[in-house]
Image (cartoon, rainbow, N blue to C red):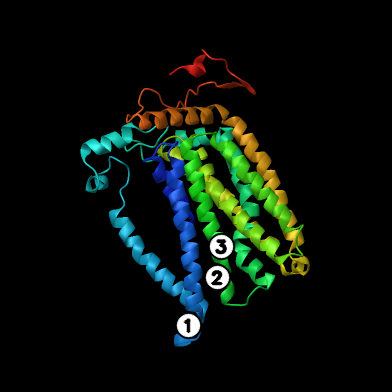
């Protein structure tokens, strides 16, 4: 319950420091460290398993005690050192006044600002009245329904494959985590290049997820095949989120609106964490969870369709993000900073009329 607010809180804070065309790289850092913790956690769990019975406590209790103490102590450092908004008093510990002014000035028009009111009911009503909150929420929830099924039950799946027993099966969690980190790094690099719009890249990842989940219930007789599908499925699933949240950041607006949107969307999407693990019940274990994987695959397919719909709703804004990012990349190669053009959020440019691209010389081609 306490942990649930951390991720949307982190994203809300990112939105007040970084531009939407930079968010892919920043969110990738977050997820990379998350997956590194998976690797470290697997190694720690393997080591701590030999403490079973020490001081009369079982090994899993020692896992919670030792890892929990480290987390709680570090939270004090975060509370003391982490700056708030770019121009807030705590930020003076990190930046000069000129630097704080520059950081906030370079943000797009929809970014949360230090001067925003603490609460705005108008922003909440605006969020709820737009279809984007519901389309993004549906997309994330459907992906989570399949993805959480894999993530939470990956140790159980690997154990049931029978390669090794406890505690050595914890080491088999390392390749999926390593693959996820590799996928995250590649995703950040691709988004930084701005070769294609972010939703197009997301659809590539979604297609990979769908294929892997279909393989889960069609190759149940091959333990090695299922394990490889677990590795690739984890890679595609973890790579999805930096691109997704970078995409989502382009349509957030204001401090209250950003916090409310991220909190509501993340909260509802956690239904995937409730329902997903329930797919792997013991009554379906007899055929290698073939039924479980089939249900998870159907959620992934529905998520694929939902992401296409959300892409349609944001096609003009996302094209604008790609266009501005390309200009910034070109300026950087010349040793310059691009400041003459920026993304329009509130009065978006029209690059598409339906599916038809707007001709050159129209509003979309203005600099």
Local secondary structure at mark 3: helix
Q: Earlier in the sequence, mark 1 or mark 3?
A: 1
Contact, mark 1 vs mark 3 (Cβ under 8 Å): no
Q: Is residue 197 above or below residue 51?
A: above
Q: Is residue 73 above or below residue 167?
A: above
Local secondary structure at mark 2: helix
For disc 3, the neighbor class at 10 Å (few under 14, some 14 to 19, many from 20) is some
Q: Earlier in the sequence, mark 2 or mark 1?
A: 1
User: Marks 1 and 3, how far apart in space?
Assistant: 25 Å
Residue 121, given in percent of the width and then of the height, sits at: 45, 36
User: Marks 2 and 1, how far apart in space?
Assistant: 17 Å
Local secondary structure at mark 1: helix
Which residue is drawn at the image coordinates 43% and 50% (left, top)?
A: 29
User: Marks 3 and 2, how far apart in space?
Assistant: 8 Å
Which residue is drawn at the image coordinates 61% and 58% (left, top)?
A: 231
> In the image, 346: left or right of 164?
left
Quadrant in the rendering for residue 207 = top right
Contact, mark 3 vs mark 2 (Cβ under 8 Å): no
For disc 1, the neighbor class at 10 Å (few under 14, some 14 to 19, many from 20) is some
Residue 78, given in percent of the width and then of the height, sits at: 33, 57
Q: Which residue is identified by label 1?
A: 51
Q: Which residue is identified by label 3?
A: 175
Depth order, front residue of 134/16 = 16
> In the image, 336: left or right of 206?
left
Q: Is residue 29 above or below residue 283?
A: above
> In the image, 105: left or right of 278?
left
Q: Which residue is identified by label 2?
A: 171
Among all residues in the image, which is located at the extreme top?
361
Q: Is residue 61 visible?
A: no
Residue 265, given in percent of the width and then of the height, sits at: 54, 45
Q: Is residue 37 visible?
A: yes
Among all residues in the image, which is located at the extreme front?
334
């Amino acid at each position: 319950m306490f942990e649930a607010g951390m991720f949307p809180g982190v994203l809300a804070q990112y939105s007040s420091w970084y531009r939407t065309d930079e968010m892919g790289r920043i969110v990738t850092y977050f997820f990379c460290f998350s997956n590194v913790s998976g690797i470290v956690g697997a190694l720690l769990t393997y080591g701590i398993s030999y403490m079973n019975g020490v001081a009369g406590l079982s090994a899993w209790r020692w896992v919670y005690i030792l890892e929990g103490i480290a987390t709680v102590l570090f939270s004090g450092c975060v509370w003391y050192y982490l700056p708030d908004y770019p121009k807030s008093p705590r930020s003076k510990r990190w930046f000069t006044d000129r630097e704080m002014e520059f950081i906030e000035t370079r943000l797009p028009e929809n970014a949360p600002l230090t001067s925003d009111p603490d609460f705005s009911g108008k922003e909440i009503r605006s969020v709820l009245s737009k279809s984007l909150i519901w389309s993004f929420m549906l997309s994330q929830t459907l992906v989570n329904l399949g993805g959480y099924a894999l993530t939470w039950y990956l140790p159980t799946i690997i154990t049931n494959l029978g390669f090794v027993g406890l505690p050595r099966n914890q080491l088999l969690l390392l390749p999926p985590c390593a693959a996820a980190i590799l996928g995250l790094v590649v995703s950040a690099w691709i988004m930084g290049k701005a070769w294609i719009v972010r939703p197009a890249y997301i659809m590539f990842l979604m297609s990979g997820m769908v294929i892997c989940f279909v393989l889960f219930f069609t190759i149940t007789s091959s333990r090695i095949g299922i394990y490889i599908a677990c590795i690739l499925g984890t890679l595609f699933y973890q790579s999805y989120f930096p691109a997704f949240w970078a995409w989502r950041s382009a349509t957030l607006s204001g401090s209250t609106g950003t916090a409310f949107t991220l909190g509501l969307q993340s909260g509802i999407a956690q239904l995937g964490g409730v329902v997903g693990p329930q797919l792997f019940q013991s009554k379906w274990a007899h055929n290698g969870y073939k039924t479980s994987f089939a249900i998870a695959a159907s959620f992934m397919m529905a998520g694929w369709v939902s992401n296409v719909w959300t892409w349609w709703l944001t096609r003009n804004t996302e094209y604008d993000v790609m266009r501005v990012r390309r200009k910034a990349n070109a300026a950087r190669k010349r040793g310059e900073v691009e400041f003459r053009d920026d993304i329009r959020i509130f009065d978006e440019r029209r690059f598409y009329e339906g599916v038809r691209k707007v001709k050159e010389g129209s509003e979309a081609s203005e600099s």
